Amino acid sequence: MQASCGRSVPAPGPRPLPSQRGGCLSPRTAWSGDPGGSYSARDPEGRGIRRPRACGQDGGRGAMRSPKLPGLVLSLLLLLPPPGPVGGAARFDPTWESLDARQLPAWFDQAKFGIFIHWGVFSVPSFGSEWFWWYWQKEKLPSYVDFMKNNYPPDFTYADFGPLFTAKFFDANQWADILQASGAKYVVLTSKHHEGFTLWGSERSWNWNAVDEGPKKDIVKELAVAVRTRTDLRFGLYYSLFEWFHPLFLEDESSSFQKQQYPLSKMLPELYELVNQYQPEVLWSDGDGGAPDTYWNSTVFLAWLYNESPVRDTVVTNDRWGAGSICKHGGYYTCSDRYNPGHLLPHKWENCMTIDQFSWGYRRNAGISDYLTIEELVKQLVETVSCGGNLLMNIGPTKDGTISAIFEERLRQMGTWLKVNGEAIYDTHAWRSQNDTVTPEVWYTSKPKNKLVYAMFLKWPTSGQLFLGQPKATLGATEVELLGHGQPLQWTPLEQNGIMVELPQLTVHQMP
């Protein structure tokens, strides 16, 4: 399988891939009559964009299994208005109408690719899911009940996993180096999941945090320092609003959320502490527990975040701020886990997904086929960015604080692919067409200021000829290049629309 732009990467697993490779093409002059458009489902002339195939073939169901796709990129041109600057002087009221009008800081759309890290006490049992406690104690799923019965004493509680979450081999600098090698531009760490265990020394989580229990260190601080001193990534934090078994939340829930004991005494103080102390530039909220945003006081907090906080000009937030707010309010939209909308959205969005298809946390019982291959991950990235989104790709470290070899390999493979093809990903815009009308598995991005369009093709044609139905090229003006190759390629116009590009005949060792 080829991981785009001509780099050959062997696919893991028992199924060999055909010896096809992908590549990235890049014309240096605008195609005549090529208008373009950004974050819109219609082109500038008001016509609906024709799509024989939708962005994201899984229709939003999640990660896909497509082991025969290599990857490539081609750059052609287009003219789109650049995004405007973020208005730093604007004041925001604690209403969704006002908050939703805030312009997303430009860095987030430019970044395109981030790494999610799910780490907590759930990494100790490392069985089934990061929802281990809920499935074991609340839903009493037989596989989880049997796992505990077969491996732990009868009186063992979930709290007993706390001291076993040692993070003995956690090295924040090593993590930062791996993150840098991945080519990601931001990272989001779970500061607290639904289990309530905080990875910093929260005074509101007495004896159930990483400073008092387990690691006996401030994980959030150590990773923040390492990321900021050793990488160019932006540092972000995930925070679960609710906790499954917190007595104050359960009491509020029993009152149909007429009481607000939990958010006032626990959630809000922790969020203010996280922002003031660690200054995350991504605040990834999650877990509304079925309570509305008015219970969480979300709009009041966000108004402070955008107006007064130390990250007010650069912070980005998602859309999970209360029941009914997802895909409707907040900063960028996530809409669901592993979200791939199938079309270009008018609002910035993010596809948060997992390398392990079945869990966000580390699983000791995961098999090799449970992990997406690098080819499948590149496909996710290309589709997501072509449709205007960011990809947030998740890994789950072990209880000891190590990033397992399979996760590290995928991160480094993605970084290798991006070293060649990153020009077609970072700081790009959605083009007037997201994918091609003639050749399957071709996805477009653009840089209008530079008069460039990139065609990322995930399968190297055996004929050596790449047929593209969307470009409108001009003989003598349009140039086409393969990223990493550098030499202009020969191309000819097709009879009706598009072009045919003659790809270079390269050996495996000559591929960029």
Image (tube, grey):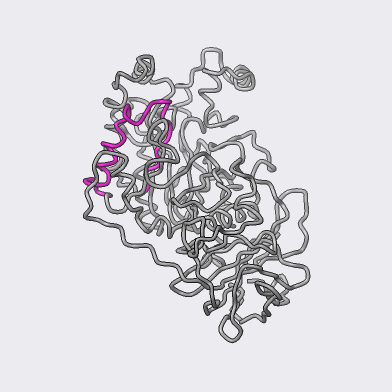
* Residue 20 x %, y %: 74, 64
Position of the C terminus by quadrant? bottom right
- Whether 232 is among the magenta residues is no
Name the residue furthest front.
46
Magenta segment includes 300? yes
In the rendered image, the vertical position of residue 467 relative to residue 242, given as above or below: below
- Is 136 situated above or below 86? above
Where residue 480 appears, as percent x and y from the top left, is 60, 77
- Which residue occupies 61% across, 44% down? 59
Q: Of 414 and 287, which appears nearest the observer?
A: 287
225 relative to 467 in the view: left or right: left
Using the image as rendered, state which of residue 311 and residue 390 is in the foreground.
390
At a point 34% along the width and 20% down the height, the residue shown is: 257
Furthest toward the bottom, the residue is 476
x, y percent for residue 104: 36, 53
Can you give x and y, in whole percent of width and height, for residue 157 in the image? Answer: 49, 18
* Left or right, 434 with reference to 10: left
Magenta-drawn segment: 282-311
Q: Judge whether 48 appears above or below 207 on screen.
A: below
Residue 395 visible in the current orientation? yes
Question: 171 or 196, which lies in front?
Answer: 196
